Image (cartoon, coloured by chain):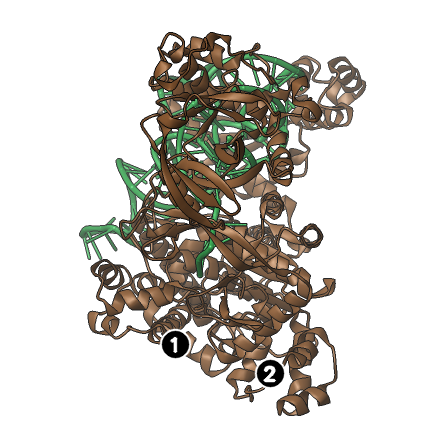
Chain colours: A brown, B green
Amino acid sequence: MNLLESYSAKEIEAKWQKIWEENAVFQPEPDSRRKFFLTIPYPYLNGNLHAGHTRTFTIGDAVARFKRMRGYNVLFPMAFHATGTPIVGLSELIANKDPLIWNVYTKLHGIPEEELSSLNTPEKIVHYFRRSAKLAMQSIGYSIDWRREFTTTDPAYSKFIEWQYGILRRLNYVVKGSHPVRWCPHDKNPVEDHDILKGEDATIMDFALIKFKMGDKVLPCATLRPETLFGVTNLWLNPTVNYVVARVNDETWIVSREACEKLTFTDRNVSFVSEISGAELIGKTVTNPLTGTEVLILPADFVDPDNGSGIVMSVPAHAPYDFLALRDLYDKDLSEFGITADLRAIKFISLIESPGYGELPAVEAVDELKVKDQNDPKAEEATKMVYRREFHGGVLKANTGRYAGIAVSKIKDVLLADLIEQGIAEIFYEFSETPVICRCGTRCVIMMVRDQWFLEYSDPEWKARVLKCLSKMEIIPEEFRVEFENKVDWLKDKACARRKGLGTHLPWDKEWLIESLGDSTIYMAYYILAKYVNAGMKIDRLPPEFFEYIFMNNGRAEDVASLTGIPQETVQQIHDDFAYWYPVDLRTSGKDLVANHLLFFLYHHVAIFPESLWPKAIAVNGFVSLEGQKMSKSKGPLLTLRQAVAENGADVTRLYILGNAEYTQDVDWRNDGVVSTRGQLERFYNLAREILTDSSIEESAPLSLIDRWMLSRLHRRIAEATEAMENIQTRRALQSAFYLLYNDLRWYQRRGGKNQLRRVLSAWVRLMAPFTPHVCEELWAEMGEGYVSLAEWPAADAAFIDEEAERAEKLLEETLKDVEEIVKVTKAQPKKIILYTTPAWKRAVLEMALALAKGGKLDMGALMKEAMASPAVAAHKKDVPKYAQKLAKAAHSLSAEALGLDEFQTLCREKEYLAKALGAPVEVYSADEPGADPKGKSSQAEPGRPAIWIE
RNA sequence: GCGGGGGUUGCCAAGUGGUUAAAGGCGCAGGGCUUAGGACCCUGUCACGAAGGUGUUCGCGGGUUCGACUCCCGCCUCCCGCACCA
């Protein structure tokens, strides 16, 4: 016996991690077994692994270990992600000793100051965190094949990415275009979420910029409701605002100064011509470019020069502000603007029919909310109300010509496209809320990035292939399938190249770096190669032909060998390895990657590989919070993997994180919970040790009832745990394999069971091995052959399911509970307990009732008739109706369970146990022949429920 | 706003039409282990109850059903994603 007297995580875990590594236990090669290729998105190297990573990776490791024990040849590799901008940014901040970063990395990530200050280049950061992450993963005992480790900045990986993008280009999936981004004019860079000081919720909205004409000049109006162009009665300008005349492309525009400034960031050529005051323009007329109508320009205070173009088109029938501003002018003297006409003569144009509103929704909304004028804050509320109701329920009226009858919610994109085609409108981007301020304090604008490379994810044919792939995949949990489908639908073209950061250059346009999500899509294939690269394979020449042969089976090994200088047999072997291991059988990931990485993963696979190599399954899991608080890498709280393992041990960390939540629920990491988990694992170890040291166990002794019961429960637990793990439900698996089985064992021991303990333990240790591999390995060394990590997963054998034994134990347990309840309620001190098991006639009636019951109904009359026909039953005709009625009432839940057991014999046999448990002598009679029955209690006996008399 | 997921007994959390007052864990209480124990074992933990019972519960309000935590409708409420960023 080499087991430590008390459980020591440190000793056990270090020992087995060393043994696994030294003996290459998790380094698979192709063989005749079924293969299982499991991957997890590699972590990004801008910090230490934290509890969130721990969860995703531990689920993956548990599945890998489970599948391995199920007889699969399992490949579980890992790599590291370093391309993109954050690491470059981080190195600059560290080099500058940025106080915030300093604090985060010393306090939250636990990096000593001297070490941190040395991380002043991207390369050093990558090196440091790569090492740190690998140590962390080893310290928690992941069964990773480390021969395949790589980093996305490795030269060979770059060749692989170049090859991939070459294909995508050839397939016309990479195209040039422009797109709007949040932009800081000071930094001259796109602004990312974490770089925003204020306005982080602002989104980029696309307005229609409608070009009203005034002679050869254009007065553009920005609107989110282009359909209302049919109902424009006038324009609004703010007389106090400064407007400018500017050349925009080939036209002359009049817009607010602020709008002109914004236009310079778009993809238009803008040059300032002159200033012009709002007052100068008011009173003039412009032409509605769609309807040709002449409308007057009027003054309004609500017009914000910083919103849109600073010119607003007025649709008083449907826009409360427009109605209010117009009404505000009714009795004003506008002669200073040269306006003498009676504005009451302006006729409102109604163009949207919506339920609950009449002709003029804006007027109704203003009345309903009692909005005073255009400066009343309630005007905003009225606007939102009308907009929402018209958007969701509105339909365009006859005066919108060919758009008549179309729902408002469907019209915007169509109409905008039409207007753009006719040269009447353009798109103008605006933040949904202002201001948006960059971390440097500068106000952000929307910049049109030109000549940008895009992955054309909007391509309908490409989408269709992704959807097809999805339809054939297993999505775990299944509820997430619709989420994936929606996101495919929603996905637009994605900019796939950047100017800054680490990464691979676009092979055909070297100014650009491939964006880092775009280089992380089919790298699972690269794991096959990485083993050879790490072993020193020559990589100075890796032309597309090389990858074509390995991954697409195009070409010949000998040609590739001579092209690359790599030995032909190596080329052949890599090729064969790939053919063996691909496709990916399962990718497990945090739910944060659904709408980006996992989607791209599918997109690129279906673009590049034939259908037979498309991924088979994706499993998604939730996050980890700390004591109810959301974790944050940059703000805290943060728990790193190494910290968790150092404080609690690998197995406890694994057990806690796998056992506390399922699927997309979050795990809440709570110290008191972790402490009690440690206690539970110690208990497991102690019990196992006790069993292993118990020399009185006779394994070959004939099976007693309780032995049979124990084996029956064991095989139920095995079946439950197996099914749960097949569905990647670690929590449910642990409930069965750990907690419930433990309770079963307690009952078994309490009932005097012993001889099957070792047999149960053997299964138990194997059931627990995917979850707590170190302690299981330690225990297995005392009881089994080889590594438990490679042992056979226990098989659930239906032959061990023993209904009779389980029923007997259930009867015993319930009888005990009933007696105890009576004792408790009566507060009696029992001197003697008498049990009467059911009379035979009640069993007979129950049997008849079971046969007669249909669809939850039981005909009482029919039952009585049949019962009385039986002489044995008829002998008790006084008592039969009462019992029959009871059965009829419970017709829907009648069960045959109680009939499968000789209750009298069972209770007689357990008399002693009952007496001991209840602290009083127990007598057992059948109600058919009651011995002592002072109060006639025996008449209450029913199948499954003995009558009880306590003296 | 759009899309997705939730609201269960002190806490965490199972549970998709009847075997559910509702698994399991934690916490708490009582008892045992007869030196102690934050170790271990047993029992209890919605309320009431001197015979195994009864009553009231699963966000709120309706509905379907012999029967609903479970199905349908409406409402309230919480969390997540909405991008060019890993």
Q: Which mark is residue A542?
A: 2
The label number, if any, that marks residue A695 in the structure image: none
Please say if A539 is above or below B59. below
Does the rendering let one see residue A728? no
Mark in the foreground, 2 or 1: 2
- Binning the other alpha carbons within 10 Å of mark 1 as few (below 14), some (14 to 19) or many (20 upward) gives some
Q: Is residue A346 visible?
A: yes
Q: Residue A378, relative to residue B10: is it above or below?
A: above
A661 left or right, relative to A861: left
The chain holding disc 1 is: A
Q: Are marks 2 and 1 on the same chain?
A: yes
Q: Dot 2: few (<14), some (14–19), or many (≥20) neighbours within 10 Å?
A: some
Left or right of B80 on screen, residue A419: right
Where residue A734 sits: x, y (%)?
49, 53
Q: How far apart in space, not on screen, are marks 2 and 1 (Cα)?
A: 41 Å
Q: Residue at x 68, y 77 (%)?
A: A548
Mark 1, residue position: A15
> Residue A225 location in percent, x, y?
54, 29
Kindly identify which chain the residue marked by label 2 belongs to. Answer: A
